[in-house]
Amino acid sequence: MFKKLKDATVDIKNAIDTRLGVSKITNATLFRRVAKTSWYQGDGAAMLMLFGTQVFTGLFMALAYSNNPDNAYESVQAITNSLVLGWFVRALHYWSGGMMVVMVVIHLFRHLLLGGYKAPREATWLVGALMFFLVLTMSFTGYTLRWDERAVYAIRVILNMFYNVPWIGEELVLLVQGGQEIGGATLSRFFALHVLFIPVLLGLLIGYHLYLVVTLGVTSKIERKVDVKSADEQQELYHKAADSKKDGEWFYPDTAFNVNLMGFIIFMIAFGLALFVGAPELYPKANLTEASMPMEEWWFYWYSSIIALLPPSLAPVFVVGFPLFVFFFLMSLPFLDRRPRRGIEKRPGWAVLVTFLSIALLSLTALRMQSPWTGLPSQKLIPLPEGVELSQQARAGRKLFVSYGCNSCHAIAGYGPGVGPDLAKVEERLSREEVLRFILNPPKDIPMPSYEGRLTEEEVIRIMEFVHLAQTFPFKQEQTGAKESEE
């Protein structure tokens, strides 16, 4: 009886397998010999887990999100505050997106070190490079959907980048913006990109990328020890390593356990951040009539730092030229570097470059976290030179100068970050009327927001009185003493 039952089960299994081809898929993907891999090669598995998390959590949020500008902000608030576990779903979506950006950069750097773009993996590299830019684009479009001040600022930044593209800049702005101004069409375009176009395209590229990895394998240890001069030689070495007891292993369960262990650890980091840190607080609702300059998301801090440190004349060229340079560099690299050397030991120049880029990214990110050029308020008052007395209006203006974040950009007599001009070192002292006009409507070539409509008439006069007097302050080195605060 049991034998008949067992035989029937086998017959059913074989019938299903014949029709669905399950065994062919598992034999080609799971039950195959591969060259042994190290644990850190699980960065690809980590990205796959994070992308799956993005899709899963995004589907749930899409059920409650409204891409109407009148309701988008409120719908995000409702997801966070009203829906059961909505705060956690949004937080997990946010942190898995940020971690995916980190992992795609790590994955890119690792293959630069190993020479993972060399024959026969040129197509694997090219598909991966396209995925790299899609991940960055998806991470950008995601936080524009909150439709708060940060979202509008991010949209204005990207529109400014497109506007600076030679010959077709205005047409690109109209295409992305969906009309003559930012509005409902703009949000609909970003929503469609983030929810439909990019995930579908990214999913297709991930599938093809995995197919190429299964077909061609990864950069094995034996490839790093010898100079591999051709694709045929690489395949011969790889299969020889895969079939050996010393250098090979079964993909399942050996390799699968190693790579998915790292993926699980990275996922748990995102899970822990979502659970204990939560999603970022929303900025005030998008205001399309007033200028505001909130900080971008943390994975773009480094880019903002570079732009802020560049001379104003070079910044517009950089914001367009740098992404294009990186794109064409990555896409042409497999055809430019045809040398047979692979592995970090044989590529010291690339090791130096990747180390430099890693330090630069972390340093620029840390610099941006100090936010010296965002106009975010600092509570530290500008010190007064010894002997300087302020009128009642100027004393009130000094405090308003701080509360509105002016001292986060402008130094006075050497005190402050000095991102903007030092107000005590202007070439020609401005009159009260000129200071007033500058505050309300700064010149178009000055990267300073207009405060017209954001300050009351009394506040403007008080700040103007302080700035007008501050132009006479002696420079820091000339001061014998300074009062740090004044009630």
Image: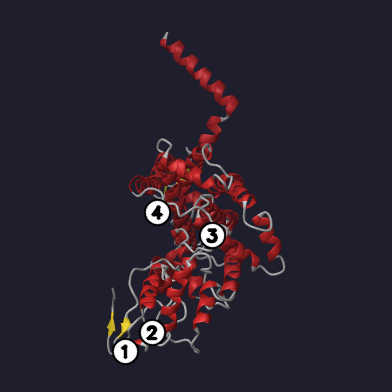
Mark 3 or mark 4: which comes first in sequence?
A: 4
Please state which amino acid type lies under the numbered disc 3.
Answer: Ala
Q: Is residue 40 above or below residue 378?
A: above
419 vs 120, nearest the viewer: 419
151 vs 352, nearest the viewer: 151
205 vs 251, nearest the viewer: 205
Inter-mark Cα distance, 1 to 2: 9 Å
Can residue 243 be seen at all in this image of the molecule? no
Q: Which mark is residue 413?
A: 2
In the rendered image, residue 49, in percent from the top left (x then y), is placed at: 45, 44
Residue holding disc 4? 40
| Residue occupying image coordinates x 51% and y 47% | 73
Inter-mark Cα distance, 3 to 4: 34 Å
Q: Which mark is residue 479?
A: 1
Please state which amino acid type lies under the numbered disc 2.
Answer: Ala
Q: Dot 4, crowdedness within 10 Å: few (<14), some or many (≥20)? A: some
Mark 4 or mark 1: which comes first in sequence?
A: 4
Secondary element under disc 4, as helix, strand or loop, is helix
Residue holding disc 3? 154
Q: Is residue 252 above or below residue 429?
A: above
Image position of 323 (left or right of 242)? right
